[in-house]
Amino acid sequence: MNPDDVLQTLQKGFRVTLGATTALVESIQDPQRREENLAKLKTNPNQLADELAVKGEATEQEARIFVDGLMAQRPGQTDSGGSFTRSAPSGPTASPEVQADLHDLTTQIAAMREELERLRQQDS
């Protein structure tokens, strides 16, 4: 197997998990969306996985921008030329409770994904 294929598979898995976490948060806020996602999961799980991967990619890019902004605002940080960098204004940060909840949700989604994969393999 080509190492690039393995990397792409891992990256897609990460993005699907990230997208599923985002979709889960949205589902909690909107019960109609939850029903739509459950219907997609029952009828065409591959399409749902592709949609979650796209959503995960967008979330990954947003997170990268957020982290870059946090890194840019660290006090006393210097660039390679030795001059101090200016702090960029940052957006709101999540409370530790929200971060813990997101971590728990991500773990649960990863476990569900593994269970789905195991069930698919049993069906094959």
Image (spheres, helix red, strand yellow):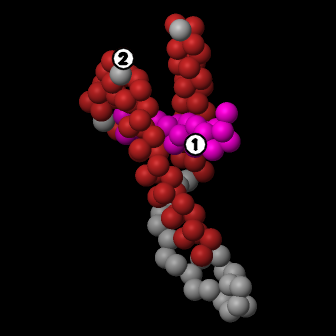
| Magenta stretch: includes residue 3 | yes
Regarding mark 2 in the picture, which secondary structure is present there?
helix
- Mark 1, residue position: 8
| Residue 16 can be seen, yes or no | yes
* Any part of residue 97 in sight: no
Q: Which numbered dot is residue 42?
A: 2
In this rendering, is residue 1 above or below 67? above
- Residue 24 colored in magenta in the image: yes
* Residue 40 figure quarter: top left
- Residue that sits furthest to the front in the current view: 2
Amino acid carrying mark 1 in the image: Gln
The residue that appears at 57% across and 8% down in the rendered structure is 122
Query: Counting other residues with Cα less than 10 Å from the Cα at mark 2, is it few (<14), some (14-19), or many (20 or more)?
Result: few
- Left or right relative to 90: residue 103: right
Q: How many badges with numbers are in the image?
A: 2
Residue 46 in the image: state x and y as whole percent: 41, 26
Query: Of the residues shown, which amino acid type is indicated by label 2?
Result: Lys
Q: Residues within 10 Å of mark 1 (few under 14, many from 20)?
A: few
Residue 76 screen position, x and y as percent: 70, 84
Q: Identify the residue at image location x=31%, y=21%.
A: 39
The residue sitting at 70% across, 90% down in the picture is 81
Residue drawn 49% across and 37% down? 16
Provide the residue span drawn in magenta: 1-28
- Left or right position of 36 against 55: left
Precedes in sequence: disc 1 or disc 2: 1
- Front one among 61 and 22: 61
Q: Main secondary structure of the magenta part?
A: helix
Q: Based on the displayed image, in which of its 4 quarters is residue 36 positioned? A: top left
User: Taking 100 as reference, is 71 above or below it?
Assistant: below
Pick the front one: 10 or 65: 10
**Residue 72 drawn at (x, y percent):** 60, 76
Single out the mark in the foreground, 1 or 2.
1
